[in-house]
Image (cartoon, rainbow, N blue to C red):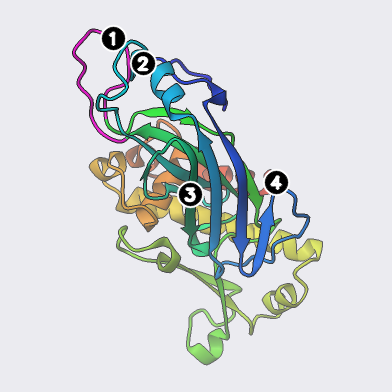
């Protein structure tokens, strides 16, 4: 466990808990600590992560100040929660599994993440928090609010993809489907409602009737196809930010949106690439938005 900040209350030591075993399940492939098998992942494939966490509960309670060594052991002990937290390097989305009550000894944890909201590298860590508010009968310095973070494991990383677009592409003949303009290479469609799940809120139609697009899809591992995909991803990212500038009010921007929604994804992108700026700050800044997204995509180092 790595700690860089002072939280204002004591924290248990790194050795108070440890991940004994873990695995990622990608389709039918199990990827673990000792596995050399590469996952065959695509956006339609969810990822399952299972973790076995061994926790020394009395030590955690004592070292965090939640239980005084002199207190009777038969008293009511503070309840702690444990969960798996995840983040995606490409989509900038994050979330967590449902919290379970932490027990002394072995704790089995698992989560399932929809492949539609993933990309790049999936990072997972175990977190231990307070499961309830606590009131002490003395003036001790200790965490007391539900959800307070007590312990975090080192991150587990699962590389899902190398270069390539981070959004689901739907091949379609624009001419046959009546999509205008019929000779375009692609068309990006974004849902108007920010509450829409991002998996359905972002649609990238690629025109198989366009000779360039057809060639790139047929030869996806060439340098030309990689550049084509980077240009496409730059446009998608730029349009997402521009969509947020036009559709997010200041109050919405400061309020956490539903996990996995289009609005949350846009908030994450804007927070990553335009920190300390609001939608109003980015109005009429399309050239700067485009340049920033292009630099982010083309300069990205793959995990």
Task: Decide which of 238, 17 is in the foreground and name it.
Answer: 17
Farthest right residue in view: 222
Residue 204 pos. (x, y %) = 52, 70
Q: Nearer the viewer, residue 60 or 297?
A: 60
Residue located at (23% from left, 7% from top): 139
Relative to 302, residue 38 above or below: below
Tell me how far mark 3 sits from mark 2, CA to CA: 25 Å
Foreground mark, 2 or 4, reads 2
Helix, strand, or loop for circle 3?
strand
Identify the element where label 4 is drawn.
loop
Magenta residues span 131-145
| Vertical order, 114 against 110 (above or below) | below
Would residue 35 be visible to someone looking at this image?
yes
4 or 1: mark nearer the eye: 1
| Of callouts 2 and 1, the N-terminal one | 2
Q: Which residue lies under the disc numbered 3?
A: 109
Q: Which mark is residue 140?
A: 1
Q: Tell which circle, 1 or 3, labels the residue nearer the N-terminal end.
A: 3
**Disc 3 versus disc 4: distance between alpha carbons?**
25 Å
User: Which residue is labeled 2 in the image?
Assistant: 65
Q: Earlier in the sequence, mark 3 or mark 2?
A: 2
Q: Report crowding for label 3: few under 14, some 14 to 19, many 20 or more residues within 10 A (C-alpha).
A: some
Indicate which disc residue 303 carries: 4
| Image point (47%, 56%), residue name | 239
Residue 99 sits above or below residue 66 on the image: below
Q: Secondary structure at mark 1?
A: loop
**Quadrant in the picture for residue 130:** top left
């Amino acid at each position: 466990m790595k700690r860089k900040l002072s939280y204002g209350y004591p924290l248990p030591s790194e050795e108070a808990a440890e991940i004994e075993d873990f695995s990622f399940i990608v389709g039918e492939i199990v990827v673990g600590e000792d596995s050399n098998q590469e996952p065959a992942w695509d956006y339609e494939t969810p990822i399952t992560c299972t973790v076995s966490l061994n926790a020394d509960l009395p030590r955690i309670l004592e070292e965090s100040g939640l239980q005084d060594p002199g207190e009777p052991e038969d008293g009511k002990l503070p309840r702690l929660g444990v969960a798996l937290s995840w983040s995606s390097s490409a989509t900038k989305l994050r979330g967590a599994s449902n919290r379970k009550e932490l027990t002394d000894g072995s704790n089995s944890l698992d989560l399932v993440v929809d492949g539609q909201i993933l990309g790049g590298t999936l990072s997972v860590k175990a977190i231990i928090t307070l499961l309830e508010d606590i009131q002490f009968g003395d003036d001790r310095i200790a965490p007391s609010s539900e959800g307070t973070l007590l312990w975090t494991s080192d991150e587990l990383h699962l590389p899902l993809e190398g270069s390539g677009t981070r959004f689901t592409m739907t091949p379609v003949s624009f001419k046959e489907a009546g999509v205008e303009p019929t000779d375009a290479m692609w068309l990006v469609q974004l849902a108007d409602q920010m509450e829409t799940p991002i998996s359905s809120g972002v649609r990238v139609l690629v025109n198989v009737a366009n000779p360039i697009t057809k060639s790139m899809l047929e030869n996806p591992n060439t340098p030309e196809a990689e550049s084509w995909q980077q240009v496409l991803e730059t446009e998608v990212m730029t349009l997402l930010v521009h969509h947020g500038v036009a559709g997010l009010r200041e109050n919405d921007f400061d309020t956490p949106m539903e996990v996995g929604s289009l609005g949350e994804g846009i908030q994450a992108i804007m927070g990553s690439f335009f920190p300390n700026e609001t939608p109003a700050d980015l109005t009429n800044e399309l050239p700067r938005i485009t340049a920033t997204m292009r630099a982010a995509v083309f300069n990205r180092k793959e995990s």
